[in-house]
Amino acid sequence: MDILPPLRRLTAILLLIGAITPASLGALPDRDAPAILLAQNYSNEINPNAYLVSEKLDGVRAIWDGHVLRFRSGRVIHAPVWFTAGFPDHALDGELWLARRSFDQVSAATRRLDPLDHEWQKISYQVFELPGGTGSFEDRLATMRRSAQKANVPWLQVVEHFTVPDDSVLQQKLKQYVASGSEGLMLHRRDALWQTGRSDVLLKLKMFLDADARVVACEPGKGKYKNRLGALLVEMPNGRQFRLGTGFSDEVRLNPPEIGSMVSYRYRDLTPQGLPRFASYLRTRSDE
């Protein structure tokens, strides 16, 4: 039995007969940034037993609005029609993910206006939240699992969660995951009602802290980095500026982030002046 909503079914038919092309789907309107939950950093003063723990996936955050996938900025992600054809008609929040240490490949695939099937055939949509859902996070997680099972789409998957009794076990888990190539862990309060904004009901735990900043200027390199990027002058959300000078690949030094773009960086802690200590570039955000 065909359970596709009428609009998506019509779109699929028009694509098959050649009446429209994947590129023409670019006419789908971008929207304002959707209201989503954002994580704070974990502190060992928190009781992790009150949370459900999952792997922190190194992918692209994507919100399914029941019709199309969108970046957290609200911009449309031009996924192949076949990729989302069987998705449920209610909202989902998750990560487009390929494998550990494969962010660049996923990022490149999701930025294309004309999606390449061979790239998307390797990608899965890892769901971890039910926007607008009722009940506790445990309740919503159960609803997500039932919805994914009903959809029966192999690449639509609900992120696996587990529990830990205390911080000591949590730290052991973190080391195990990081040693296997993972970014870290996420903790979501099991009794939390659905909410948006940055909240301690959702926590991230990594070997290093991380944050985002806006690029203010690109400084030229010297010596072996002559005619390449030397450092980025970046601005934190509070208006403080600092130089980000390490962590760049050769490709980034040849093609530095644009002025005004957002970059992610990692750091060990803050100086007494409130600036990141040992800050290192991670990536340019592609979902802003």
Image (cartoon, rainbow, N blue to C red):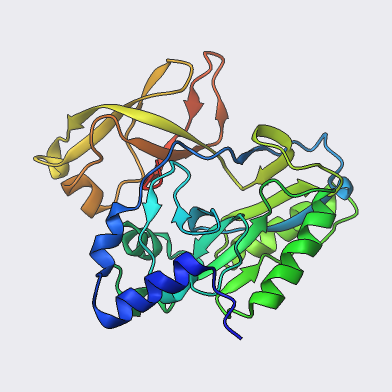
Q: Position of residue 211 (x, y in %)?
A: 50, 35
Is residue 109 left or right of 265 when viewed as pictured?
A: left
Quadrant of residue 209 in the image? Answer: top right
Q: Position of residue 198 (x, y in %)?
A: 64, 32
Vertical relation: 182 (above or below) 258: below
Residue 164 vs residue 106, the one in the foreground: 106
Q: Residue at x 16, y 48 (%)?
A: 254
Residue 250 visible in image: yes
Q: Residue most toward the left?
A: 227
Residue 271 vs residue 37, the one in the foreground: 37
Q: Residue at x 25, y 70 (%)?
A: 20
Q: How many marks?
A: 0
Q: Position of residue 25 (x, y in %)?
A: 30, 60
Quadrant of residue 204 in the image? Answer: top right
Is residue 21 left or right of 158 when viewed as pictured?
A: left
Quadrant of residue 95 in the image? Answer: bottom right
Is residue 165 left or right of 44 when viewed as pictured?
A: right
Q: Residue at x 48, y 44 (%)?
A: 72
Q: Position of residue 259 (x, y in %)?
A: 24, 31
The quadrant the C terminus occupies is top left
The quadrant the N terminus occupies is bottom right
Vertical relation: 144 (above or below) 257: below
Residue 98 visible in image: no
Is residue 234 left or right of 184 when viewed as pictured?
A: left
Q: Residue most toward the bottom?
A: 1
